[in-house]
Image (tube, rainbow, N blue to C red):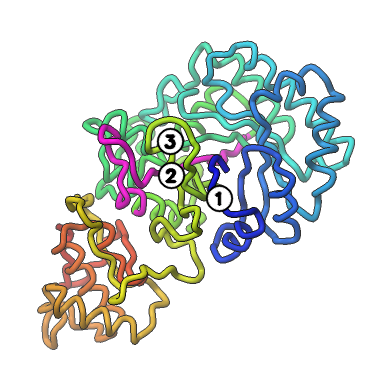
């Protein structure tokens, strides 16, 4: 909400209804937003700003007032399921604030108890990956020694109340800070081989999974008998950035968030906890023009303030239009094409109509210049003789031939980038 050109809350709620988003995380308790979310079925994680932690910690009455003002008028019509107290407090430089964090959480818990909603509304606090002294390999992860006393207090609270540990996990920042040491494919869920943890034998197919298990291992190392689940309270990838911001491109953002969404929707956990799904919040809903910092900070959004998609991440129920007469998204004028990562393919999105698939084949195999010889009768990729199979091959050929840019797999929202090789039998889909 850090922008002066964003649509009003009611319009935003209608926008969310047209997506597969079923939960939102707010950084503050905005009454208009909470009212707009009433009776929508969209659950809410409600944030408490860092500057409110000291008064909430020092006064149970202040916590009661906060709950009376920001929870009671809206709940249960607005499905508030959690309160996120502060943001990345443990990795700040204010030791006094760290010491006040759990007292503030305790007082809010007592206030919820007074409303008899403490079992339905959980309390936690989001931390960044910087709370860890080491995160690779995941099995050796541990909290930083100077943070450990405060982290133990948080974990004791979470174990006592049955709440989850919230972590802001960004493979983007890991890659941007060390592009030579961190594989882009690994950061984008597109790694062919993954990375093996030599101590556990677990192979991680993505940096995201490795980061989540690093948090699990660090929590377990503290020694709590009760399992504390993990929620990803923030993750994302910027679609633009300054010249020195490595990896901040539209293509990378689309690949990361598209693959993240598929990863989360699968319901599969991490190698350490394979049966435990990973609730995940994508930062952010909108590009925010007033957010301070480098250009990337203003370009994490899935949507423009106009409510148009920044790129298609597979979240919208009604697929957005590119606005081009031929339905295919061209290279942005004046930019140099940037090749995407290897081992990524373009295929037809499930649900595309037969008419749309035929149009794609006609375009890609005609003026698009794709090599469609393999889908001719008697060739290796002719069978199965379906429009979806032939369109997928043609789309991928077009995508690979034109430089593997995200817009080369748009096809009026009928294209889908995937790290899973669609080749089968003797039919080989080229990857570069």
Tell whether position 237 is magenta.
yes
Query: Please, what secondary structure does the residue beneath circle 2 have?
Result: loop
Q: Nearer the viewer, mark 2 or mark 1?
A: 1
| Rendered image quadrant of residue 72 | top right
The residue tagged 2 is 300
Q: Nearer the viewer, mark 3 or mark 2?
A: 2
Verify CB contact (< 8 Å) between mark 1 and mark 3. no
Q: Is residue 109 left or right of residue 326?
A: right
Q: Position of residue 35 (x, y in %)?
A: 75, 52
The residue tagged 1 is 6
Q: 299 or 247: nearer the eye?
A: 299
Tell me which segment is drawn in magenta: 227-254
Residue 211 image label: 3
- Tell me the residue at 77%/45% (across/down): 120
- Tell me the residue at 39%/54% (across/down): 259
> Which mark is first along the chain, 1 or 2?
1
Does residue 183 appear anywhere in the picture?
Answer: yes
Q: Nearer the viewer, mark 1 or mark 3?
A: 1
Q: Is residue 268 left or right of residue 345?
A: right
Tell whether position 230 is magenta.
yes
């Amino acid at each position: 909400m850090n922008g002066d050109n964003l649509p009003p809350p009611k319009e935003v709620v209608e926008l969310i209804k047209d997506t597969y988003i079923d939960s939102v995380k707010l950084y503050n308790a905005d009454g208009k937003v909470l009212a707009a979310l009433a009776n929508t079925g969209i659950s809410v994680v409600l944030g408490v700003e860092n500057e409110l932690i000291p008064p909430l910690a020092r006064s149970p009455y202040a916590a009661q007032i906060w709950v009376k003002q920001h929870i009671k008028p809206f709940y249960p019509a607005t499905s508030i399921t959690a309160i996120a107290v502060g943001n990345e407090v443990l990795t700040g430089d204010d030791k006094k604030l760290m010491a006040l964090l759990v007292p503030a959480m305790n007082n809010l818990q007592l206030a919820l108890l007074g409303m008899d909603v403490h079992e339905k509304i959980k309390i936690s606090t989001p931390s960044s990956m910087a709370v860890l002294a080491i995160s690779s390999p995941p099995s050796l992860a541990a909290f930083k020694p100077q943070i450990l006393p405060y982290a133990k207090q948080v974990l004791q609270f979470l174990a006592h109340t049955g709440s989850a540990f919230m972590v802001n996990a960004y493979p983007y920042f890991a890659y941007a800070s060390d592009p030579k040491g961190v594989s882009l494919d690994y950061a984008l869920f597109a790694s062919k081989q993954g990375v093996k943890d030599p101590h556990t034998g677990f192979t991680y197919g993505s940096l995201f999974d490795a980061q989540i298990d690093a948090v699990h291992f660090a929590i377990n190392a503290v020694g709590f008998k009760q399992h504390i689940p993990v929620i990803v309270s923030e993750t994302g990838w910027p679609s633009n950035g300054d010249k020195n911001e490595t990896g901040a491109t539209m293509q990378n953002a689309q690949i990361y968030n598209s693959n993240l969404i598929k990863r989360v929707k699968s319901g599969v956990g991490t190698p350490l906890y394979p049966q435990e799904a990973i609730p995940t919040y994508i930062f952010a809903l909108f590009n925010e023009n007033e957010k301070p910092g480098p250009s990337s900070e203003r370009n994490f959004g899935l949507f423009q303030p106009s409510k148009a998609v920044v790129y298609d991440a597979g979240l919208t129920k009604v697929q957005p239009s590119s606005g081009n007469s031929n339905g295919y998204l061209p290279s942005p004028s004046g930019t140099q094409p940037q090749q995407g990562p290897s081992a990524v393919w373009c295929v037809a999105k499930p649900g595309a109509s037969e008419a749309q698939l035929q149009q794609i084949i006609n375009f890609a195999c005609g003026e698009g210049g794709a090599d469609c010889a393999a889908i001719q009768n008697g060739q290796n990729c002719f069978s199965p003789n379906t429009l979806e199979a032939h369109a997928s091959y043609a789309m991928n050929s077009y995508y690979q031939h034109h430089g593997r840019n995200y817009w080369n797999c748009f096809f009026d929202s009928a294209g889908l980038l995937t790290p899973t090789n669609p080749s089968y039998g003797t039919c080989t889909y080229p990857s570069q």
